[in-house]
Image (cartoon, helix red, strand yellow):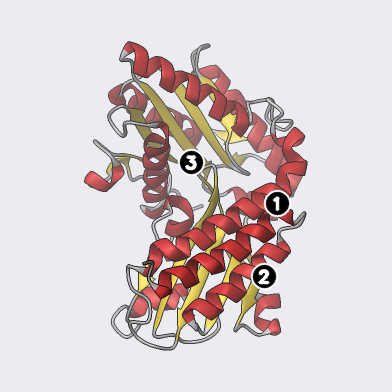
Amino acid sequence: MIETAVVSRLHQLSDIIGSLKNAQQYEPVFHLIIDRIKRLYRCQTCAIILIDPKTEYLRIENSSGLSFTFCKSFRTMMTTGEIGKLLWTGDPILISDSRIEKERTREVQLEKPFGSCVALQISINQRARGYLYVDSVDVGHFTQEDVPVLQMFADIAGLALHKYRLQEKVKRLERVDPVTGLGTYALFIEKVNESYNRAKTFEESFALVIFDIDNFKYIVNTFGPDTGNDLLKEIADVLRSRMRGVDIACRYGIDEFVLLLFKTGLDDAVKFADGLRIFIDENIFTEKKIDSAISVGISVYPVNGSDIDEVILTAKHALFEAQRAGRNTVMYYRSAWYQGEPVAVSAKTKNL
């Protein structure tokens, strides 16, 4: 016999999946997710918080237990704190006793104090779209056993959002980014799969270099979006001039780039990445004479993982650590990210 609690959870999920099959919008699915979590866990607060793809600010898309005023005024930047780490790496946040973990509680809490909480990444194809937040007034209300169940709700939210955004498929599948002239994320996924299959067959290596522009938001806010685009174009030109013809450079996000370096080991990848960091650090860009810098994360197959997901995730962890270390830094791991500490190539930091 299946336990009553398990049956209850399956019924909750069944309702949501039925809505997911038939709904053309993601809002009804989000509403059901919030409602079912509230019923299942009798929590104080439940919220689905998404990343605005245009601004990269976080916004509360659907919630229960939060005031309208709080939701309307909530506009938080992605940071390198607990929520930033969750969004970059996908590591769940579980606080069983807020009295013990006061600093983490301060970073995670929304409108109301809580006794325990869980926050889980909402993602599509290894790209964070936001997070699911649930809290309770009771200490110990959430335990490690609740994390995989709540992660299922978060994954369904990601699927609902992905289904809705399929109408943008043609735009996303363009192989050339209109601003930089580099490849798109879709092209990167295609090429990294090809590289992985070849590397696995012929026992080769390849490297991923992911970086973002440290002061990009400041540049856009100060000089305007046109100057921001000019900077992106010039960074793209730098990549073209420094990369081999066989390598691939793609735009990964608003101010993020990912490079695929074929037949490249860890030492050569680190040397290339730090050379790129130094070049950008020592030069100025656009007619506004902009002084910029980059934070870089590196991973290499098979040193940092046995499959594509592990290699990408290790590079993202390394980039997160580079940002947290003070930016203008290259970081990498000597094995999978969860098996050791990150290594910094340079910790030189500008006052950006």
Secondary structure, mark 3, is strand
Residue bearing mark 3: 294
Which mark sits nearer the N-terminus, 2 or 3? Answer: 2
**Up-down: is 98 above or below 197?**
below
Which mark sits nearer the N-terminus, 3 or 1? Answer: 1
- Quadrant of the snapshot with the N terminus: bottom left
Q: Position of residue 41 (x, y in %)?
A: 47, 79
Q: Which mark is residue 54?
A: 1
Residue bearing mark 2: 31
Q: CA distance from mark 3 to mark 1?
A: 21 Å
Q: Residue at x 38, y 35 (%)?
A: 311
C-beta proximity under 8 Å, tags 3 and 1:
no
> Does residue 80 appear left or right of residue 347 in this picture?
right
Which mark sits nearer the N-terminus, 2 or 1? Answer: 2
Secondary structure, mark 2, is helix
**Label 3 neighbourhood size at 10 Å, few (<14), some (14-19), many (20+)?**
many
Residue extending furthest toward the front: 1
Nearer mark to the viewer, of 3 and 1: 1
**Up-down: is 122 above or below 59?**
above
Q: Position of residue 99 (x, y in %)?
A: 32, 86
> Does residue 302 appear left or right of residue 138 in this picture?
left
Secondary structure, mark 1, is loop
- Frontmost residue, 271 versus 4: 4
Q: CA distance from mark 2 to mark 1?
A: 24 Å
**Label 1 neighbourhood size at 10 Å, few (<14), some (14-19), many (20+)?**
few
C-beta proximity under 8 Å, tags 2 and 1:
no
Which amino acid, by three-letter code, is at mark 2? His
Q: Residue at x 64, y 26 (%)?
A: 182
Nearer mark to the viewer, of 2 and 1: 2
Which amino acid, by three-letter code, is at mark 3? Ile
